Amino acid sequence: MNLGLQSEELEKIRLFFEPESVAIVGASRTPMKFGNTIVKNLIKLRYEGHIFPVNPNADEIYGLKSYPSVSHIPKRVDVVVVAVPASQVIEVIRDCGQKGVKAVVVISSGFSEAGEEGIRRQREMLSVARGAGIRIVGPNTTGILNPYNNFTSTFVDLKDLKKGTVAFIAQTGMFAGTMTEWIVSTQNFGFSKVAGLGNKSDVDDYEILSYYAEDEVTKVIIMYIEGIKNGKRFIEVAQQLAKKRKPIIVLKGGRTKEGARAALSHTGSLAGSDEVFDALLRQVGIIRANDMEDMCDFAKMFAFQPLPRGDRLGIVSISGGCAVMAADACAQSGLTVAKLKPQTLAKLEQRIPHWARIDHPLDVEPLVETMGFTEGFRIALNAALGDENVDCCLVSLGAMGGWSELRDIDFLLEARERYPEKPLSVSIIGRKDIYEQMAHDIEQASIPVYFNISRAVNSLAVLFKYKQYLAEVVDDV
Amino acid sequence: MNLGLQSEELEKIRLFFEPESVAIVGASRTPMKFGNTIVKNLIKLRYEGHIFPVNPNADEIYGLKSYPSVSHIPKRVDVVVVAVPASQVIEVIRDCGQKGVKAVVVISSGFSEAGEEGIRRQREMLSVARGAGIRIVGPNTTGILNPYNNFTSTFVDLKDLKKGTVAFIAQTGMFAGTMTEWIVSTQNFGFSKVAGLGNKSDVDDYEILSYYAEDEVTKVIIMYIEGIKNGKRFIEVAQQLAKKRKPIIVLKGGRTKEGARAALSHTGSLAGSDEVFDALLRQVGIIRANDMEDMCDFAKMFAFQPLPRGDRLGIVSISGGCAVMAADACAQSGLTVAKLKPQTLAKLEQRIPHWARIDHPLDVEPLVETMGFTEGFRIALNAALGDENVDCCLVSLGAMGGWSELRDIDFLLEARERYPEKPLSVSIIGRKDIYEQMAHDIEQASIPVYFNISRAVNSLAVLFKYKQYLAEVVDDV
């Protein structure tokens, strides 16, 4: 049972993500127009359902029959995407009501973000929609993306979509679009679902969260929000997600007085006190990201790794400098540098030159002198992960020109297999072309890679904090 | 006059960076050996001076005549690079003394970082060197890099070197090498000089800083340090650099107890109290970076932009969401969101659709509706920069597939020309292939680009803080 939503309402939310048919009002043959790119995206990405362009001035668009209005479409329409000027939107909603449509994505801007006239228009649109039992995503948004059926309402020209386990919810339209493109083009984890809610006139975060709670492919949720309308419902759904062990990572716009003022003029959101918001998040185990990069860093870690049993970090490093920075990051992020058992150190001690010493953090350099990079890393990482005083491990690698041996990552895959319960995080510094290839290969094996040691450690710390929250609040209940 | 060093000592430091001849002891024909890559780098990068390989078992290496020892070389040798096992190093230093060499880079490890035996060896090496008036960089380091004469002692396989204005000093060897490769391969600003000091047995940070103070091409200095040996001298030189308006950005390893412990076992440095260190840095206007990315972000800003008159930030954004995040970052980093003059807003008001409003931060969307992206950004950015209440400006761009108009950056170059005294910072989010190309083009014009709004704003804030330090401490004296 879904605590957040009545099942009828949840079914309407589901329509936004899993429609079997879509009408695009404002579908256009003119390149660069929103109504053009939306249709092109659906065709190019091979959306699995029926596509009905709506444009009174066209007979067909990209080979698809075009209709003068939604109510002219002879088949069932699960969702309507509206990309016409704001002044025409209410008429379209009325037409949707006549057709019996229950889910509408309003792409158009010119509503609550656009002065008194826009606010009135948004109010009227909502009243028409409610009268007809229609739910609205938007207005002023790029809307929905579902890589599992290739449905999208976005007007951003999309390339291939990687299926994954991370779901995204963003207030604000353009930003949701560019963020989505940023994540798709830089991250090896894929999306399960994306929802840009724009002005959030109707469908709210907590409703999307309710759907994500039920969505089997969604394991992690990232959010950009400027304001929460229904705090009570939001908390209920967040608790439900915690019980399902689906972490939520939130990036909040309007944290400061200055940001809140900008948010008010942007999506018309009242951002509220940041202290209150922060306390609310902590209460339900929501993880807070400080910026876009944090949000992706944490999402990747949760998508790829199990939760650690404890906070004791093993560090295996290509250089002493990286080991020092890792130890600093460990202490600063709330993890502890693991104390390796004497037996573990003694075993390694046997394999290094007589002049060298072995200590934790493990600088692999002395091992490399006797057995080369690959074997040195293999021995050191297995020793760290095999030590019962270690809960999770950072591996700091280098990507240096000419040292092809460094690119051999089999030792990581082997360690992953052997100690699947201990989360791993990898950092690489060095030459970009090399480390990007290494990162791609390593992340194919679901081991997260960061190009900054403090990010690699901090992301593990966030994993531990979530584990702690579950242990203290959820599992004890 | 150089306050930090007597001129004779400074001349020895200069030899490390500007040698007219170099001997490589341990030069090798075997690929992957340090002594091989060092010689190859010098040849490949077209080092301008004479190269003398030293290897008793070879007649020539890569077509260069090889000598059995340094003292066998018939010409003057300005600097010697030593890449033989630790146990042979002291003998080499004696030989250098006999030849009258004054500058030696010891690449080899197995000294103070390697137990009691290593500590004794380092002490003995130093005593031999001092007796002969030899200065030592290292041991346990990649050493020196100078893109202006293509001299290097590094064993990391280097590609092309971009000449620039940023000088780097790093304790610790391998880390200096990988950091250098990271910066060279990811940044469009170039290096003026790089010095990896390894264990810092002899030549210390403050001496390199003294040389950088005199070095005409160096404008900005970045440092990774684990410990400072001579705090008094360090402060003197830092003050001297502030008078020359050359900012120093420091990343400190061993900030925490855990990190300090790792640093002790790594370079044998006593990291000292972080609070004391922090106070010391602030006193001389040194900027502190929290991690590698910070260090590069700030360096790029100083390398490319002038100092702002004040702290009032103008924000011109492609999306409301980005504007909100920029306003948050502004407040959090210690800048203030500029209050634009009524005339500025009124002028823009005339150019947007009747339903829209204009406010600062400037969301360009309404302007884009009437005049397209390029012109919208041009009008908005010129309005912001032309307003006397604006000291510096953030431009938040998007890189979205299919919208080629977004890639037109002429408006930025134009604004740069028109308002050269107001620092600009650009952030881009969107698709990686597009934003990397845009960033390359924009940074060719010396406008720094960040792929995270908070980084773009924070780097401007650091610029302002340095300006404030100069105004309060240096210019008032």
Image (tube, coloured by chain):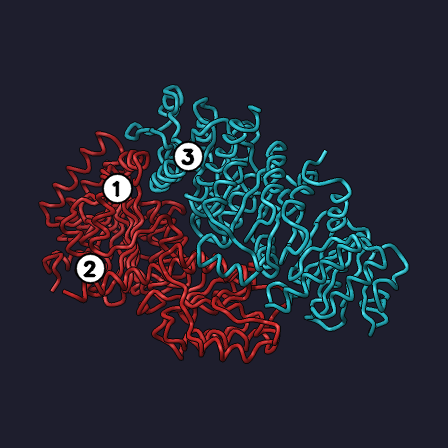
Chain colours: A cyan, B red
The residue that label 2 is drawn on is: B211
The residue that label 1 is drawn on is: B274
- How many numbered marks does the figure carry? 3
> CB of mark 1 within 8 Å of CB of mark 3?
no
Check the residue under mark 3 and report the chain it is in. Answer: A
> CB of mark 3 within 8 Å of CB of mark 2?
no
**Where does residue B192 sit, x and y in percent of width and height?**
30, 62
- Sooner in the amino-acid sequence: mark 2 or mark 1: 2
Nearer the camera: disc 2 or disc 1: 1
* Amino acid type of the residue tagged 1 in the rendering: Asp
> How far separated are the C-alphas under marks 3 and 2?
36 Å
Q: Does residue B456 appear in the picture of this structure?
A: yes
Q: Does residue B155 appear in the picture of this structure?
A: no
Check the residue under mark 1 and report the chain it is in. Answer: B
Q: Nearer the viewer, residue B444 or A123?
A: A123
Report the residue at 38% width, 71% height from top.
Answer: B390
In the picture, measured across the screen, residue B322 lies left or right of residue B208, that is: right
* Amino acid type of the residue tagged 2 in the rendering: Tyr
Find residue A316 and name its label.
3
Q: Quadrant of residue B312?
A: bottom left
**Where does residue B355 sit, x and y in percent of width and height?**
62, 72
Q: Quadrant of residue B335?
A: bottom left
Check the residue under mark 2 and report the chain it is in. Answer: B
Residue at the far right in the pictured view: A74
Q: Nearer the viewer, residue A187 or B136?
A: A187
